Amino acid sequence: MRVKDATILIIDDDKDVLTAFQLLLKPLVKEVILENNPNNIPNQLKEKAFDVIFLDMNFNALVNTGNEGIFWLNKIKKMRPEAAVVLMTAYADIDIAIKSLKEGASDFIVKPWKNAKILEAVETVIKSKTKDKAPQTTTGDEFIIGESAEMADVFIKIKKLGPTDANVLILGENGTGKDLVARALHDHSNRSQKPFIKVDVGALTPSLFESELFGYKKGAFTDAREDREGRFVAANGGTLFLDEIGNITLEQQARLLSVLQNRQVTPLGSNEVIDLDIRLICATNVAPDDLADEGKFRKDLIYRINTVDISLPALRNRKSDLVLLAKHFAAQYSDKYNKSNLELEKDFISKLKNHEFPGNVRELQYVMERAVIMAEGSSLTAEDLVFSSIERSVTTSNESDSLNLDDVEKNTILKVLEKYKGNISKSAKELGITRAALYRRIEKYEI
Ligand SMILES: Nc1ncnc2c1ncn2[C@@H]1O[C@H](COP(=O)(O)OP(=O)(O)OP(=O)(O)O)[C@@H](O)[C@H]1O
């Protein structure tokens, strides 16, 4: 469909906004309908099919929760699922706006907006409506590969959140691409020309935590032979990426919180207070449920670092990306090792799909590098695909070709052991057998 054939509904209780929309869109589209009372939305929808609906998030100036926008969004999607809804939001409500994308909104624009942004939103949603039925092949960032619906969601968030200064918490298992996403957020921000500083806070000892992050003055402690700038100050003007944030002690959390609250840091042994202007991105492989455990993690810190979160899906939960990524790495390593671009044979792909990839994309990357190095012929066959004992193949029983009972039992045990990271008690409980019975089977199957 073309923009000039579009029928557009604008819902906002501010008459000036409605007039501005009308002046802008009327000459460009088929019809613009204005509505200043959200309670009339059902009637409007009964009368006409709209292609695009611009919906204000807050109608009552006194209650700025944005929930009213979500309420009306749900109503519209129920009555007219085919209509593309673009939410209009204040900057402070950006996290609610992001949530609205999950609830079915097609896009959102942040107030105050430029006319170009509105036109861009109309064009984008009309374009995506036109190719709605085509398979999704979004590759949001040049280096982040993925065409699954889960990754499309991630790309939208990178694009939307990048230019804001919102604190982002990236969640995901090891090797799912948290580093890449942090970098992409920085690259999409206005700070992209400024420093991007990464600190693996989970790996810092208690004494290093302070000196590394806050810096120190010469003589502040025995080994402080000269002044050293902390990572907070190094990131000033740019982005600070704190990785493995779920692994720091409660005491370290308190120190971090006070810096983030005050937006100031004092190097060890110094009286000088340094103002900070940083965008904070944090990442963790700790599951959200565990982060909610107040014995391990301060709620106030979680709130501060997590204006919005981005969850990266495990590779085993987005099999449609698996082959795409495997081909990408095959090409990359064929190039690196001066081999002609190695194709993936069918048996290679099916072996790949039967693996659980507990190490996610990083594991796939290693496996592909090894396969390319070992390959003899002009294509990759199942024989070239070797999972090391660390990344042991955990073939799910229902995906396995074998219906042999022993194989099924062995695979189930492997899967459960993997799930509980080798914890015998928890695994035995899940399998419904005693610890001794589990040990006997581990011995029997040489696990
Ligand atoms: N979607 C993707 N497209 C291309 N490469 C990817 C993708 N996801 C991850 N990778 C690659 O996989 C490797 C691991 O990614 P990354 O270091 O970002 O993961 P991580 O979640 O930060 O891991 P960890 O929790 O262990 O730090 C990197 O080499 C990265 O380039």
Image (cartoon, rainbow, N blue to C red):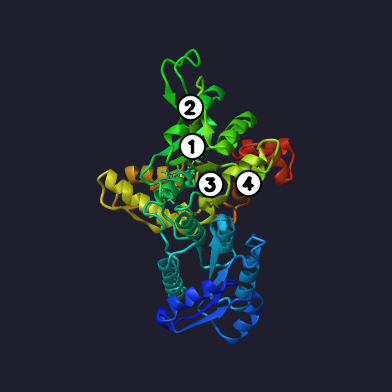
Determine the secondary structure under disc 1: loop
Going from N to C along the chain, the mark reached first, 2 or 1, is 2
Q: Where is residue 3 in the image (x, y as percent from the top left)?
A: 41, 78
Q: Are marks 2 and 1 in contact (CB under 8 Å)?
A: no
Question: Would you place residue 45 above or below residue 367 in this image?
Answer: below
Label placed on residue 167? 3
Mark 4, other Cα within 10 Å: few <14 / some 14–19 / many ≥20: few
User: Which of disc 4 and disc 3 is earlier in sequence?
Assistant: 3
Q: Are marks 1 and 3 in contact (CB under 8 Å)?
A: no
Mark 1 vs mark 3: which is more N-terminal?
Answer: 3
Residue marked by disc 4: 288
**What's the distance in space between the residues labelled 1 and 4, CA to CA?**
28 Å
- Residue 6 drawn above or below residue 61: below
Q: Which residue is drawn at 43% across and 75% down?
A: 24
Amino acid at dot 3: Asn
Residue 447 visible to an observer of this rendering: no
* Quarter of the image with the N terminus in it: bottom left
Q: Where is residue 410 in the image (x, y as percent from the top left)?
A: 61, 45
Identify the residue shown where x is 47% and y is 41%.
278
Residue picked out by circle 2: 212
Question: Hey, what amino acid is under mark 4?
Answer: Pro
Question: Can residue 300 be spotted in the picture?
Answer: yes
In the rendered image, which residue does mark 1 sit on?
276
